[in-house]
Image (cartoon, helix red, strand yellow):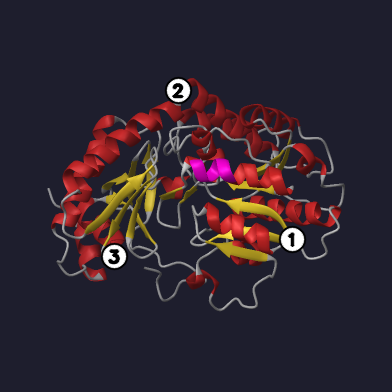
Amino acid sequence: MQAATSRLMRAYARQPVSFIRGSGARLWDEHGVEYLDAIAGVAVTSLGHAHPEIAAVIAQQAGLLLHTSNVFRIDWQERLGERLCALTGMQKAFFCNSGAEANEAALKLARLHGHRRQIAAPRILVMENGFHGRSIATLSASGNPSKQQGFEPLLPGFHRLPYDDIDAVRQAAAQSPDIVAVLVEPVQGEGGIRVAGTGYLRALRALCDQHGWLLMLDEIQAGLGRTGAWFGHRHADISPDVITLAKALGNGIPIGACLARGAAADLFSPGQHGSTFGGNPLACRVACSVLDIMVRDKLPERAAALGGRLLAGLQAALGAHPHVVAIRGQGLMVGIELDRPCKELVGRALAEQRLLITVTRDKVIRLLPPLVCDETQIDDIVARITRLLASDGVKAATTAEISEQRMHPHV
């Protein structure tokens, strides 16, 4: 909870805890209380906290060079572009600072693509419950009215459809000649951990080929190993035209990337897009190290195995729980849907179980543990969630109770 005297804008509903140290999937607050992190900074710290190799790279690069601007060639940016294009099958990369900025770049590519096809008012297909960022353009593309409220008028040019419904896409194609692209998440994270069917993604690819649309996949939360494959779309064995990445790419250092192939790769010309800090030597060197570690330690494969263990454990423990509607996910991207709003469980998980979780779409407990968790920690997440929901129905703890419990943790 933010103090009344804080000089920070009230943009966040903060929990009454401040972490000062981390190691792997563990965190410690200012009182020395240990917590288990099952959210990884919302899919960011996939290598865990304070990874020694990442810390060493940050320290070394900080002593060499942090920023020169994109007026000049940046060697680490070139290296990262090569690595990501080889990994994704894309041809060109644009680097920025966040997922929202990566999606902004994708949306601009889509409009350029439309204008090159002589479409004066290009439209982009987006999905209900999708989430692509909080800038005005990405907020307009997102499908969450509660996050859009108060920021109207939103940008035009988006046609929203039900997620994982290919018939709706076919109908839109038949009705509108101005569609130029589809922007979709292979797994909706903010949307409640909803996994697109492989048939749906393959049919989207076919429709984009048929109509000359760009298939743009938002892999910001699902990408880089979290679903048990390097990217969420790999489960459907398709190749998009544009991929957006961020979050886990820097393991906590801000970086985003928009990757493109084919006609989309050559749409930007000098002056049409840019970023002051995007692709700086520090962020790009860290991202190269993140990729090195993920490849060496086979973290996508590890996420597949640990994700199966997590889902199986939750199904066994909570499958018959009276308030659990569904348990779903892919790899280490798991949601537990309840039959009623449960946002208070975030605070209760901290206070009662020393566990970090989030709740999305009001009713879905979202779990995004670091990919470096061990089997014992995965089992511990299941045990703590089970204990949390076993006491479901007990009133939410007050702020004073939470603070007292943090200062005097149960033995």
In reply to whether residue 200 is colored magenta, the answer given is yes
State whether residue 395 is above or below residue 212. Answer: below
State which mark lies toward you, 1 or 2. Answer: 1
Q: Main secondary structure of the magenta part?
A: helix
- The disc, 3 or 2, on the residue closer to the chain's N-terminal end is 2
SS at mark 3? loop
Residue 23 marker: none
Question: What's the distance in space between the residues labelled 3 and 1, CA to CA?
Answer: 42 Å
Q: Is residue 53 left or right of residue 71?
A: left
Q: Amino acid at mark 3?
A: Cys
In this view, the residue in front, 97 or 128, is: 128
In this view, the residue in front, 155 or 98, is: 155
On the image, the x and y values in percent for residue 17 come to 34, 58
In this view, the residue in front, 39 or 124, is: 124
State which mark lies toward you, 3 or 2. Answer: 3
Q: Residue at x 64, y 47 (%)?
A: 207
State which mark lies toward you, 3 or 1. Answer: 1
Question: What's the distance in space between the residues labelled 1 and 2, CA to CA?
Answer: 47 Å
In reply to whether residue 224 is colored magenta, the answer given is no
Q: Residue at x 80, y 54 (%)?
A: 112
Q: Tell me the magenta residue range.
A: 199-203
Residue 342 marker: 3
